[in-house]
C-alpha cells in the first residue's frame, strides 16, 4: 500500500487518485457518486487525510479499470 509521509507531525497517505481522476476528466462529485461515497471522502483521500477501506479502494480501482496498487502505491 502507499507510504505515509510525515509533515508537521501529521501523517499523510500518499496516493495518485487526483492524477488518475483528472486524467479521466472526472469531477470529485462524479467519482464519489460512482463509488457510493461523499465528495468530502474523495477530497480527504486525495489530500491524504483519509485512508480508504479495502472495499472502497477496490471500487475506485475497478471504476478506473486499474489495480489498487496502481492508484494507492507509490
Image: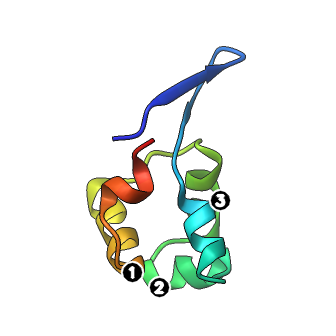
**Percent from the top left, x then y, of residue 28?**
65, 74
User: Which residue is at a point 51% across and 48% down the rendered structure image?
Assistant: 15
Q: Quadrant of residue 8?
A: top right
**Mark 2–mark 1 distance (CA, rounded to whole Å):** 8 Å
- Crowding at dot 1, Cα within 10 Å, few <14 / some 14-19 / many 20+, comes out as few
Which residue of the protein is positioned furthest toward the top in this rendering? 9
User: Which residue is at a point 55% across and 68% down the rendered structure image?
Assistant: 20
**Percent from the top left, x then y, of residue 11?**
56, 25
Answer with mark 2 or mark 1, whichever residue precedes in sequence: 2
Considering the numbered disc 2 on the image, is that residue within a helix, a strand or a loop? helix
Asked whether the beta carbons under mark 2 and mark 1 sit within 8 Å of each other, the answer is yes
Considering the numbered disc 3 on the image, is that residue within a helix, a strand or a loop? helix
In this rendering, the answer to whether 69 lies above or below 38 is above
Of the 4 image quadrants, the one containing the N terminus is: top left
In this rendering, the answer to whether 26 lies above or below 16 is below
Asked whether the beta carbons under mark 3 and mark 2 sit within 8 Å of each other, the answer is no
Nearer the camera: disc 3 or disc 1 = 1
Answer with mark 3 or mark 2, whichever residue precedes in sequence: 2
**Percent from the top left, x then y, of residue 24?**
59, 81
Of the 4 image quadrants, the one containing the C terminus is: top left
Q: Which residue is mark 1?
A: 63
Q: Which residue is mark 2?
A: 34
**Mark 3–mark 2 distance (CA, rounded to whole Å):** 15 Å
Given residues 9 and 26, the one toward you in this image is: 26
Q: Which mark is residue 43?
A: 3
Asked whether the beta carbons under mark 3 and mark 1 sit within 8 Å of each other, the answer is no
User: Which residue is at a point 65% across and 59% down the rendered structure image?
Assistant: 43
**Mark 3–mark 1 distance (CA, rounded to whole Å):** 17 Å
Amino acid at each position: 500500500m502507499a507510504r505515509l509521509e510525515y509533515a508537521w507531525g501529521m501523517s499523510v497517505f500518499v496516493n495518485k487518485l487526483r492524477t488518475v481522476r483528472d486524467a479521466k476528466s472526472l469531477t470529485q462529485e462524479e467519482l464519489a457518486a460512482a463509488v457510493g461515497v461523499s465528495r468530502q471522502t474523495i477530497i480527504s483521500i486525495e489530500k491524504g487525510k483519509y485512508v480508504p477501506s479495502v472495499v472502497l479502494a477496490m471500487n475506485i480501482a475497478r471504476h478506473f479499470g486499474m489495480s489498487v496498487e496502481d492508484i494507492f502505491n507509490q
